[in-house]
Image (cartoon, grey):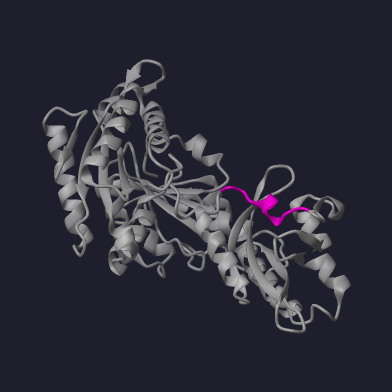
Amino acid sequence: MIELKYPDVLLDSLENGHMIIDENFIVLYWNRWLAINTQISKYEIIGKSLQEFYPDLNYTVLLRKIRTALTLQTPSFYDTSSNTKFITINRNKVTTSALAFMQQQVTISPCLNNPTSVLISIYDISELYETKLSLKKEIDKVNKLNDKLEADQEIIDKNIMTMKTTLDGVIIDASTLFCDFFEFTKEELIGQKASKFKSGEVSDATYKELWKTIESKKTWSGEVKNKTASGGAKWVQSRITPILDENGALFEFSAVYHDITNEKLFAELYITDSLTKLYNRAHFDEVIGSITKHQRKAETDFVLVITDIDHFKSINDNYGHQVGDEALISVAKTLKNSLRENDLIARWGGEEFVIMLKNVNIDEAKTIIEKVRMNVQNTKVVEKINLTASFGLTKYNIGEEPHNTFKRVDDALYEAKKSGRNRIVVK
């Protein structure tokens, strides 16, 4: 067995799988969870190639992911699709589902004490996947029941969230399930405005579109985040239909809702950086790719910013990676709190963050980022480490390829760090 300096006891106690392999797919570590769930002991597999035990794995993709993690020194997903398994693991849990094999979320991270190896972590997301399947079945169920609303009011009342309002939004009826879901009694709702459910997290533009649609006698469908009586928030898929009188004039509005809260949380896992809780790089790439592809003038009026924590490596070297993580979290919070609500911010990788300042010129952007720079400068970690950051700024030129914009802003950041750090450079 290959000796590996790693916290074996800690990893063996975790309720998920962890292995360490090198670029040749040689297994250097295999924790207890994997041994139990795969029925392959560490004595059988350590020192051998993973290919001997799992020949069907796509090793071309795996090697690319390993090299990406080692080159960028940042974790990456093996595959964000819950339909794809990493290694085949039978499900041991008794379930009514036909799901025989474990659905997995797999991350590949640089191994801190071995620069040529990666830590592969396997998380069992089978229950989340089953929830997704269940949600789809429920949506199908709602669509079928919606065709016979008038035929069975009792079933509708107990199994579907429905609400009726007057033309000015006053609630005149709500199903039992609707009341239970939002934690109100029917008596508390009748006579109240439907706007009482507004969470404050749905844009005015969405509500403007909603009213414009239904007032033109058309059905509106969309996702909204509503608040409950206890102050919580839940996501619902909404379908609001105008009801016409015998003369064809608007009479009332009828709405059907479906709970998609779990589905939203499930989706959020894949666009959020787990450490800083900011958006991750993949989501930022997707957003900027969509904007530059469609070239809508209102969306392409933005300034791109990349910032890097100064001397971050020395923080890790002198105080340890836990303090380094605290520094990343503190800076992420400072950046987010210093920006406007509609600006987009993501962790770019390592100690770098990327920002999209919307609807600003370069002078306005520089003013905003100068405030951000000062706020970072006033941020401390463990009450003794002063932090600073360097910033590169550039204006997106309509029609240009995104990689040219990133090249320009990256050059600006490099110049900021080269010329003394804790400063802003515009390109």
On screen, residue 119 versus residue 218, left or right, reads left
Q: Nearer the viewer, residue 216 or 70?
A: 216
Compared to residue 245, the image places residue 97 above or below, namely above
Q: How many marks?
A: 0
Work out whether residue 92 or residue 408 is closer to the camera in this orientation and state it. 408
The answer, for residue 372, to whether it is visible in the render is: yes
- Looking at the picture, tell me which residue is in the foreground, 266 or 254: 254
Q: Provide residue 51's location: percent of width, then percent of height.
A: 37, 63
Q: Does residue 407 sit above or below 172 in this rendering?
A: above
Choose between 310 and 75: the one closer to the eye.
310
Is 43 left, or right, of 389 in this rendering? right
Image-quadrant location for residue 386 = top left
The residue drawn where x is 49% and y is 46% is 31
In this rendering, position of residue 180 left or right of residue 420: right
Residue 166 position, x and y percent, is 75, 65
Residue 114 x/y as whole percent: 30, 40
Which stretch did the figure color magenta?
192-200
Res. 40 in view: no
Instruction: Tell me which corner region of the image, top left, top right, bottom left or bottom right, holds residue 415.
Output: top left
Q: Which residue is at a point 38% across and 47% down the rendered structure image?
A: 343
Residue 408, x across and y down, in percent: 15, 50
Residue 382 found in image quarter: top left
Q: Quadrant of the N terminus?
A: top left
Q: Is residue 197 magenta?
A: yes
| Location of the C terminus (image quadrant) | top left
